[in-house]
Image (tube, coloured by chain):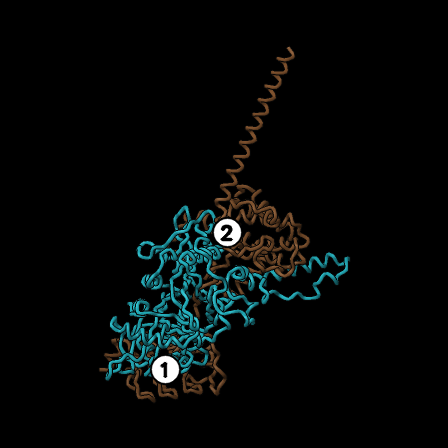
Chain colours: A brown, B cyan
């Protein structure tokens, strides 16, 4: 009887033991498989981290870029730069300003559903920039615990790259491992949620950070759009530098300025107050010259109606009609010709308005004959 | 933060000198400090964080003349180059843009037309023509895999673009195979999606896969570290239009008629034997150009295939003229310019600004000044509004005299993974990137 009992006992124990052994083996095998898949994708995943450029990540401890405190080493500073590196991969506006209302010929709004930058994107982007800036300031980051910094890191990675698929760094690389864990433990959190959480944490740490950010964007809108329109790479669109002419002995009166700017009321007042309508500036130009030069037809008509000399010559012998043909002011030239402006009067170079006319204006031809 | 641009910490904000009772005030000060630094960082150092991870000349090494000229990093074995593309945010996917395909070419054209480089005031935007893009992206030996696009997965819409083309570029007496990187463009609606760095890394990876380890590129901003900084100059050909559209301004004391007169050009070129370049001229032009470019520190190493591609006239893309001696029929001089129109944003009368850009010019018999004046004349004949030139090569010698005015744009030239001992003068540069 006792023998039986003993036998059953040992059989049961044996069964349990072999079950446990089998279980253990299966765990070990599956673990190995997991590890193998990770190892296979190692070369690829190693480069998922923006800063681990091929062959550049030589020691796991120092986090690229050397941006923040590459000089002073030490655990906490590594985490500082964990955050600082966020800033390094930001895509600053590339070539051109952010006009959202642009006339896209292919602007089909449905196409942009879930693709275009949302307010959340903008906000997140600003928050990462702020954190990068804050991390650059050693003093301020001291009060942010490593845990929080790592949490921000993990959220950043989720938001920008999605769930962690990188292999676990070796235990010796402590910082790298901590970062990896921070990322990995967030699992398949949606990027939007990660962005929002990130923003919430930053807002809790620095309640007024957004004030700084909006201050910046306001400053950017008014002060220097130049940085926006000049992308990180590529050609530059350059326009003329405006050079104020140096002061010489050139003199003109107020009435010339009114004619130039098309200020009809001011010009009328000048004439009423007794300023001669054919007053010349130091270059011999009358108000009519200036009005024609700048293309003000109504001003030209007004001056002619006030008995302006339609054939007045400046110091170079040019009449308003010379100006109109040089500047290809067709309507004004036609008006002047119809008011019997002389098309054959020669300037000091011997050119008449007719000579200077490059366009095929029929009324110019007719009156020539 | 880059060493050269990290704002110096002002001593009064050093907390060591602040007593505990001032803790709150200190925190406020700190916050202000952070906000200020944040703004500084936004404006100056942010972009360098990317470039400081790259094998490019760093600002801190600028004064260090002991560093050797040449590659900064040795090539890695091709087997160690990452084989798969970099990860994009999940809504996007990589695409290779086949510029031979009319449809793809149209997409690239439209992306650039609506989203590429603008001037400071957002009045103009480059409008590279489709013919130009095909020309610029398919030189001899080009790699289709270097014409990289990003599409939105759902709509398949092209939202970003970057390209490289192969070039042999000589630095002093070493000819280096390089990629010329250009046309980096991200759709305006995606500007905060941080795509540019990954695009730069992806094009770098694909360049590496072809066993090429150096690149040349330009930028309007200062990055680590320019090999030279050039200035744009502009010569009005159609001053009235330039003034009307806001490209240039008319001073209060200046008249339009005098301005028009100032920029008037003769109807036809002055140099006897000045004519359009033809296919039969390729060997002579190649000799002329190779000989001439030899004097510059950094210049392309053109062979006949390159000259045929880059300099043989292509309607609406590149114009080249030369001087054939009426007596000996030798080709003695050469000038060229490329066509790069821009959209004029928000002008009722005009929609396009037609600009010619000085390309490569060689004068051996004709004075350079006269040769370039003839170039201006033919550009005017072809109805260009403005003729632009950088102060590279010997351009400085004719700019002022031919009535070019300085522009507000500076163009910085860069080499990737190649250190040049010291910064060059623009006149030492013999390279024009499109």
Q: Residues within 10 Å of mark 2 (few under 14, many from 20)?
A: some
Residue A150 can be seen in this image: no
Q: Quadrant of the N terminus of chain B?
A: bottom right
Which residue is the site of mark 2?
A47
Mark number displayed over residue A99: none
For residue A281, above or below residue A29: below
For residue A77, above or below residue A334: above
- Cβ atoms at labels 1 and 2 below 8 Å apart: no
Task: State left or right for residue A129 relative to residue A116.
Answer: right
In which chain is the residue bearing label 2?
A
* In-front residue for pair A208/B269: B269
Mark 1 vs mark 2, CA separation in Å? 53 Å
1 vs 2, front mark = 2
Task: State left or right for residue A297 relative to residue A215.
Answer: left
Q: Residues within 10 Å of mark 1 (few under 14, many from 20)?
A: some
Picture coordinates of residue A36 (x, y %)? 50, 41
Picture coordinates of residue B384 (x, y %)? 33, 72
Which residue is the site of mark 1?
B369
For residue A49, above or below residue B18: above
Q: Secondary structure at mark 1?
A: helix
For residue A119, above or below residue B411: above
Picture coordinates of residue B285 (x, y %)? 30, 74
The answer as to whether the residues below labels 1 and 2 share one chain is: no
């Amino acid at each position: 009887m006792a023998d039986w009992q003993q036998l059953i006992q040992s059989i049961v124990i044996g069964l349990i033991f072999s079950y446990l052994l089998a279980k253990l083996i299966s765990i070990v095998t599956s673990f190995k498989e997991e590890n193998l898949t990770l190892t296979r994708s190692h070369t690829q995943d190693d480069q998922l981290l923006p800063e681990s450029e091929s062959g550049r990540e030589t020691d796991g401890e120092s986090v690229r870029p050397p941006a923040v405190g590459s000089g002073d080493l030490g655990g906490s500073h590594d985490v500082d730069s964990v955050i600082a590196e966020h800033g390094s991969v930001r895509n600053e506006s590339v070539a051109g300003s952010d006009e959202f209302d642009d006339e896209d010929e292919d602007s089909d709004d449905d196409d942009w559903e879930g693709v275009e930058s949302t307010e959340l994107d903008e906000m997140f982007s600003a928050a990462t920039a702020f954190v990068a800036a804050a991390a650059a300031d050693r003093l301020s980051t001291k009060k942010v615990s490593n845990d929080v910094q790592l949490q921000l890191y993990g959220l950043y990675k989720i938001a920008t790259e999605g769930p962690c698929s990188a292999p676990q760094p070796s235990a010796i690389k402590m910082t790298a491992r901590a970062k990896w864990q921070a990322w990995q433990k967030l699992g398949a959190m949606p990027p939007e949620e990660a962005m929002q959480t990130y923003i919430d944490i930053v807002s809790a740490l620095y309640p007024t950070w957004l004030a700084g950010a909006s201050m910046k964007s306001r400053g950017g809108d008014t002060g220097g759009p130049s940085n926006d329109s000049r992308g990180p790479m590529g050609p530059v669109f350059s326009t003329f530098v405006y050079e104020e002419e140096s002061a010489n002995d050139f003199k003109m009166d107020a009435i010339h300025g009114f004619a130039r700017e098309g200020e009809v009321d001011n010009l009328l007042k000048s004439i009423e107050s007794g300023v001669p309508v054919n007053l010349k500036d130091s270059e011999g130009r009358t108000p009519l010259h200036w009005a024609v030069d700048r293309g003000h037809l109504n001003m030209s008509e007004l001056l002619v109606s006030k008995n302006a000399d339609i054939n007045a010559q400046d110091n170079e012998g040019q009449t308003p009609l010379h100006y109109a043909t040089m500047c290809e002011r067709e309507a004004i030239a036609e008006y002047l010709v119809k008011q019997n402006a002389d098309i054959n009067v020669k300037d000091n170079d011997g050119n008449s308005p007719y000579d200077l006319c490059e366009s095929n204006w029929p009324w110019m031809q007719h009156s020539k004959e | 933060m880059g060493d050269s641009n990290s704002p110096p910490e002002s001593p009064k904000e050093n907390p060591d000198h602040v007593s505990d009772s001032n803790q709150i005030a200190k925190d406020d000060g700190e916050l202000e400090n952070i906000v200020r630094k944040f703004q500084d960082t936004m404006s100056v150092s942010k972009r360098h964080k990317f470039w400081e991870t790259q094998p490019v000349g760093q600002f801190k090494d600028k004064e260090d003349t002991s560093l050797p000229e040449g590659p900064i990093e040795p090539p890695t074995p091709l087997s160690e180059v990452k084989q798969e593309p970099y990860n994009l945010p999940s809504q996007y996917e990589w695409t290779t843009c086949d510029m031979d395909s009319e449809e793809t070419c149209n997409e690239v054209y439209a992306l650039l037309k609506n989203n590429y480089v603008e001037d400071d005031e957002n009045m103009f935007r480059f409008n590279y023509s489709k013919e130009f893009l095909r020309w610029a992206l398919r030189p001899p030996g080009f790699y289709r895999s270097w014409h990289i696009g990003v599409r939105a997965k759902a709509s398949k819409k092209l939202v970003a673009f970057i390209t490289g083309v192969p070039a042999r570029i000589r630095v002093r007496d070493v000819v280096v195979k390089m990629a010329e990187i250009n046309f980096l463009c991200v759709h305006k609606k995606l500007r905060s999606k941080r795509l540019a760095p990954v695009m730069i890394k992806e094009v770098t990876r694909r360049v590496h896969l072809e066993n090429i380890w150096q690149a040349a590129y330009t930028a309007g901003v200062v990055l680590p570290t320019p090999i030279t900084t050039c200035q744009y100059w502009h010569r009005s050909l159609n001053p009235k239009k330039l003034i009307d559209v806001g490209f240039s301004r008319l001073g209060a004391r200046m008249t339009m008629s005098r301005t028009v007169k100032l920029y008037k050009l003769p109807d036809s070129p002055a140099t006897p034997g000045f004519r359009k370049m033809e296919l039969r001229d390729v060997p002579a032009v190649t000799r002329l150009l190779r000989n001439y470019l030899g004097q510059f520190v950094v210049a392309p190493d053109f062979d006949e295939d390159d000259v045929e591609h880059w300099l043989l006239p292509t309607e609406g893309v590149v114009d080249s003229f030369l001087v054939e001696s009426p007596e000996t029929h030798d080709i003695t001089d050469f000038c060229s310019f490329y066509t790069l129109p821009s959209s004029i944003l928000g002008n009722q009368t005009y929609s396009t600004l037609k600009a010619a850009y000085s390309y490569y010019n060689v004068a051996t018999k004709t004075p350079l000044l006269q040769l370039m004046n003839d170039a201006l004349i033919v550009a005017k004949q072809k109805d260009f509004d403005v003729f632009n030139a950088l102060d590279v090569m010997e351009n400085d010698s004719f700019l002022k005299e031919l009535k070019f005015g300085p522009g507000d744009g500076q163009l910085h030239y860069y080499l990737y993974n190649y250190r040049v001992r010291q910064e060059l003068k623009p006149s030492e540069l013999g390279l024009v990137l499109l």
